[in-house]
Image: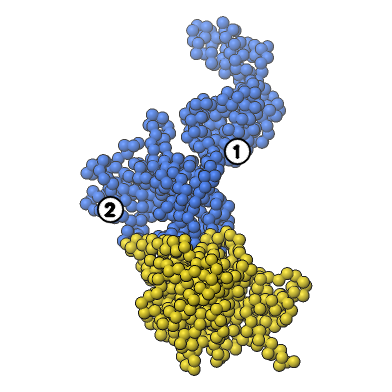
């Protein structure tokens, strides 16, 4: 994957990618005003006098936004700048009431950090790669223009105006669309763990500006283009793929890459020019005189650090090393913070029910969750977040398997019933009479009947065709409607077949 | 009886803040009588002076009625109870048009009240109206207002040539000097309280940056703008500043400190105090009248017990150019919000797109001086010029502050003239911006350093026009500034007032 190359007519090209991710900070209030930030509210219902830039209105920083950005910086192992400052980025647009965006150009809140990506989740041999992060700064979002409300006029919705964003700027360290996809996925994962951004790309809570250039392997960086506001991992990868091959085509035809801003069209998967560097705004950045420099105390930083949860890499390592999960299960279960939380509630409840420690029930729980529950929910078109079966109910089911009350295959039936009815596992097993039988008399009777009905196969087995053993187990279990204790069935069969 | 009442009302307008407050509290007259007297005076002068953009007699009466009712009910009265004031039209007033004297905000009625004006109303003051000013507080003569120039009540003897009331708080200075308001709010970015106070023979103090909330004050240059009182004398300024100042969580640059009892702390005995006289302010060609009044001031402070110390503020000569980079830079950004999209003027030519609407709106709404400063500010912040101008100016600003801090290691206050001349005729300097900017040469350094500074009347020029003396103090030492000013006031015995020619 790291050797991703574009085969041009004149030879191989390497792609160089950097991402600027805008992540909306999850807070009740905007960066510099008390307005609410809920997604999907009626236009202009979440707008304060500050957000609308009324005369004489002043910004006051929202402590929680700063806190979340600092925690995010800590989660990517970044330098936290105890002294930072807000700057004004000046330009005119109808969605920008102040005529400037309050951002941080010269002294960002968070400095150098890094994120480690797994190059191929399905191939542990592929290894990992560290992607550098240059900075995270905090800034205001703009409002939104609505062009479809009136035949000749555009309307402005200021609900988003002033919402707090983190701009997370990577180093140009990625070399393929897949690496960029893995970086974005990992970044989203970390933000969701930290709780600083919900990562909802379809609602615009997270979007990426994609910087792409191409070069001959080993040579200097080429001229880059920036594709703005790409809002899914898939689109980011598509935009890179298209933009890189477009650049190769231009260069191979003897042309030059123009440093410019481009737009991605999700319909066609292509990018097109928006404005070139010559048309670029002169933003006239200068320190915002309405705001004092942001100075963070040691106590504040300590509180930020203490409030960080276990992060994805640490959790994943713990799942394999302490809980003994497979690398695959550990990856799947830590991919999203909510999945991990669900799993951890499950093993806590399972351990309690089964009187064991968590490590002893983790493997069973992980296997069941990743194969049984995910499969069943998938069929219902549901995600874990709207699973009708709670972790506590699942723990009850797993304990019934654990103590031999039901077999694994009966557990599948019980799960289906649980999803259908919402009833508890024990109640279903009781009601449906699914309890596994350990009554050797009943098992012997069933085995006798099976052997009698298949005398020819018994002959063959005894003649050396031992593979038929499985057939006899199957027939016996069938005859017992799946309720025979598998170990006992095996024992009895072995004895009777001699 | 009717005659007596009329005389009483005339006399009332001769009273200042303290006398009105005490008179209302003591029952010598009612707040309503006070409001009626000033409402009448405002109405009588409006045509001649144009001090107000809108008058609000009903607001003055309503506030007065409330004070009278509170007094009747035996409730405690506020610091400004029964005192009607003029409100500079840079302060947002809920339900009353707020324009910053610009056509771009004509008709704009804020649904909110500035912190400072609210504090004044809470202290029992009433509003006579919104006072005229230089447009967006940019000017030193009140000629840049979009609502007509303010005429100073002062005249050179029998000469009827209209004189500048100073600026930008020219409506405020004219109203107080003309006895149509006992006091008024001002704002000061580079001298906009002090210079007009000097031009009109009244007192005005710009407190330490951060003392008064900027919330709800239309911004000119955020790092410099400070509100302050303009009144007849030092005591009145102290009273009113107490009512205006205080921490405001809605302004990040507001100082989270208690408001001192400045009025109670007034003390003109300056024994043990040192007063600095900065040699750099004694510029070549300093107006002889101004030089003389400065010397008078030095003698008065000596008489009050102070020791006079020659000091140096070496970066003084760079203050004006520095100010004219920083203030326009901030203004160019602060004024970007007046774009015709959400409020105020919108000029939408047939078939215009968004950029064309911006251009048309701002071309029609802003006056020439505002446009000049937006252009200067945009230029100094531009790529390629930023470091040479803005960054450099910030460095010089720091040096100017250091000059003061160093001086304050030895002196308690600094005495200078407020302005380089007495009031000039309207129109005399309006064609030469640099000539106009030079009016701020003595007031700008204290603004850049964020220091408290006050102008008090010192006497009259040979032409019979007021001259002001300027006291600059340490950060947060408004008391020291007020006390030195009080010592000057007591010795200057300034009693001149403009003849009532309107």
Q: Which chain is yellow?
A: B
In which chain is the residue bearing label 1? A
What residue is shown at x 50% (from left), y 71% (from top)? B471
The mark closer to the camera, 2 or 1, is 2
Picture quarter with the N terminus of chain B: bottom right
In which chain is the residue bearing label 2? A
Q: Are marks 2 and 1 on the same chain?
A: yes
> Circle 2 sits on which residue?
A257
Between the C-alphas of marks 2 and 1, the distance is 50 Å
Give the left or right position of residue B286, taking residue A27 as reference. Answer: left
Asked where in the image residue B38 lies, by quadrant, the reply is bottom right
What residue is shown at x 71% (from left), y 71% (from top)? B77
Residue A131 placement (x, y as % from top left): 39, 40
Element assignment for label 1: loop
Residue B142 placement (x, y as % from top left): 48, 80
Depth check, front residue: B17 or A411: B17
Closer to the chain start, of discs 2 and 1, is 2
> Circle 1 sits on which residue?
A387
Residue A189 placement (x, y as % from top left): 49, 41
Whether residues under marks 2 and 1 lie with C-beta atoms below 8 angstroms apart, the answer is no
The colour chain A appears in is blue
What residue is shown at x 49% (from left), y 62% (from top)? A290
What residue is shown at x 29% (from left), y 42% (from top)? A14
């Amino acid at each position: 994957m790291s050797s991703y190359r574009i085969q041009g007519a004149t030879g191989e090209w390497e792609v160089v990618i950097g991402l600027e991710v805008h992540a909306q900070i999850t807070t009740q209030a905007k960066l510099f005003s008390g307005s609410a930030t809920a997604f999907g509210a009626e236009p202009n219902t979440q707008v304060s006098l500050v957000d609308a830039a009324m005369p004489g209105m002043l910004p006051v920083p929202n402590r929680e936004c700063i806190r979340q950005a600092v925690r995010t910086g800590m989660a990517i192992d970044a330098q936290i700048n105890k002294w930072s400052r807000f700057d004004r980025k000046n330009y005119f647009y109808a969605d920008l009431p102040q005529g400037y965006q309050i951002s941080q150009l010269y002294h960002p809140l968070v400095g150098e950090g890094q994120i480690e990506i797994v190059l191929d989740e399905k191939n542990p041999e592929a290894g990992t790669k560290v992607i550098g992060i240059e900075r995270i700064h905090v800034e205001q979002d703009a409002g939104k223009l609505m062009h479809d409300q009136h035949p000749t006029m555009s309307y402005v919705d200021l609900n988003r105006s002033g919402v707090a964003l983190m701009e997370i700027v990577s180093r140009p360290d990625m070399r393929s669309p897949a690496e960029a996809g893995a970086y974005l996925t990992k970044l989203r994962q970390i933000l969701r763990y930290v709780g600083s951004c919900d990562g909802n790309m379809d609602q615009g809570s997270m979007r990426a500006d994609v910087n792409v250039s191409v070069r001959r392997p080993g040579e200097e960086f080429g001229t880059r283009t920036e594709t703005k506001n790409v809002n899914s991992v898939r689109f980011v990868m598509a935009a890179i793929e298209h933009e890189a091959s477009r650049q190769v085509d231009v260069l191979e035809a003897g042309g030059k890459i123009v440093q410019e801003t481009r737009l991605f069209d999700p319909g066609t998967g292509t990018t097109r020019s928006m404005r070139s560097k010559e048309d670029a705004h002169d933003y006239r950045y200068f320190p915002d005189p309405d705001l004092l420099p942001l100075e963070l105390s040691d106590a504040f930083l300590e509180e930020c650090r203490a409030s960080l949860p276990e992060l994805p890499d640490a959790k994943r390592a713990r799942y394999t090393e302490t809980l003994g999960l497979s690398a695959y299960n550990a990856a799947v279960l830590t991919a999203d913070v909510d999945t991990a939380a669900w799993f951890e509630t499950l093993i806590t409840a399972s351990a309690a029910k089964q009187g064991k420690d968590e490590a002893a029930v983790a493997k069973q729980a992980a296997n069941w969750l990743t194969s049984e529950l995910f499969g069943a929910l998938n069929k219902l078109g549901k995600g874990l977040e709207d699973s009708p079966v709670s972790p506590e109910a699942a723990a009850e089911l797993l304990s019934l398997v654990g103590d031999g009350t039901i077999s694994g295959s009966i557990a599948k039936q019980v799960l289906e019933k649980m999803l259908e009815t919402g009833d508890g596992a024990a109640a279903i097993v009781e009601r449906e009479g699914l309890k596994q039988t350990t009554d050797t008399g009943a098992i012997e009777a069933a085995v006798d009947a099976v052997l009698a009905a298949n005398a020819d196969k018994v002959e063959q087995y005894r003649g050396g065709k031992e593979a038929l053993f499985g057939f006899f187990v199957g027939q016996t279990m069938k005859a017992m409607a799946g309720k025979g204790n598998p170990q006992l069935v095996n024992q009895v069969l072995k004895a009777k077949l001699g | 009886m009717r005659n007596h009442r009329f005389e009483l009302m005339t006399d009332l307008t001769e009273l200042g803040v303290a006398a009105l407050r005490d008179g209302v509290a003591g029952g010598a007259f009612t707040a309503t009588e006070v409001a009626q007297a000033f409402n009448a005076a405002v109405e009588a002068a409006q045509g001649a002076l144009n001090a107000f953009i809108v008058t609000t007699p009903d607001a003055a009466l309503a506030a007065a009625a409330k004070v009278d009712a509170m007094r009747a009910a035996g409730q405690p009265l506020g610091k400004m109870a029964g005192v009607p004031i003029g409100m500079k039209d840079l302060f947002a007033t809920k339900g009353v048009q707020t324009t910053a004297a610009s056509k771009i905000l004509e008709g704009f009625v804020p649904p909110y009240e500035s912190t400072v004006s609210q504090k004044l109303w809470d202290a029992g003051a009433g509003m006579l109206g919104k006072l005229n000013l230089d447009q967006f507080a940019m000017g030193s003569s009140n000629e840049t207002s979009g609502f007509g120039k303010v005429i100073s009540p002062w005249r050179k003897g029998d000469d009827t040539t209209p004189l500048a009331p100073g600026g930008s708080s020219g409506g405020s200075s004219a109203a107080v000097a003309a006895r149509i308001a006992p006091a008024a709010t001002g704002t000061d970015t580079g001298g906009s309280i002090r210079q007009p106070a000097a031009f009109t023979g009244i007192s005005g103090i710009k407190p330490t940056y951060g003392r008064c909330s900027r919330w709800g004050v239309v911004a000119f240059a955020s790092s410099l703008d400070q509100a302050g009182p303009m009144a007849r004398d030092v005591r009145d300024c102290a009273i009113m500043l107490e009512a205006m100042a205080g921490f405001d969580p809605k302004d990040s640059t507001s100082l989270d400190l208690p408001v001192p009892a400045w009025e109670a702390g007034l003390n003109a005995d300056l024994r043990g105090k040192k007063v600095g006289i900065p040699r750099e302010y004694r510029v070549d060609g300093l107006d002889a009248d101004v030089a003389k009044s400065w010397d008078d001031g030095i003698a008065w402070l000596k008489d009050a017990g102070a020791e006079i110390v020659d000091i140096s503020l070496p970066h003084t000569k760079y203050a004006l150019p520095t100010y004219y980079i920083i203030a326009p830079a901030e203004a160019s950004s602060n004024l970007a919000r007046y774009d015709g999209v959400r409020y105020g003027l919108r000029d939408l030519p047939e078939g215009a797109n968004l950029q064309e609407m911006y251009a048309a709106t701002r071309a029609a709404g802003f006056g020439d001086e505002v446009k000049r400063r937006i252009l200067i500010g945009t230029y100094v912040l531009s790529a390629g010029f930023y470091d040479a101008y803005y960054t450099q100016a910030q460095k010089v600003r720091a040096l100017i502050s250091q000059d003061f801090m160093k001086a304050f290691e030895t002196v308690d206050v600094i005495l200078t003239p407020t302005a380089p001349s007495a009031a000039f005729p309207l129109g005399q300097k309006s064609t030469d911006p640099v000539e106009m900017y030079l009016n701020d040469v003595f007031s700008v350094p204290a603004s850049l350093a964020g220091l408290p500074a006050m102008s008090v009347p010192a006497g009259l020029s040979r032409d019979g026009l007021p001259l002001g003396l300027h006291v600059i103090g340490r950060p947060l030492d408004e008391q020291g500034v007020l006390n030195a000013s009080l010592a000057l006031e007591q010795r200057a015995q300034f009693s001149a007032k403009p003849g009532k020619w309107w």
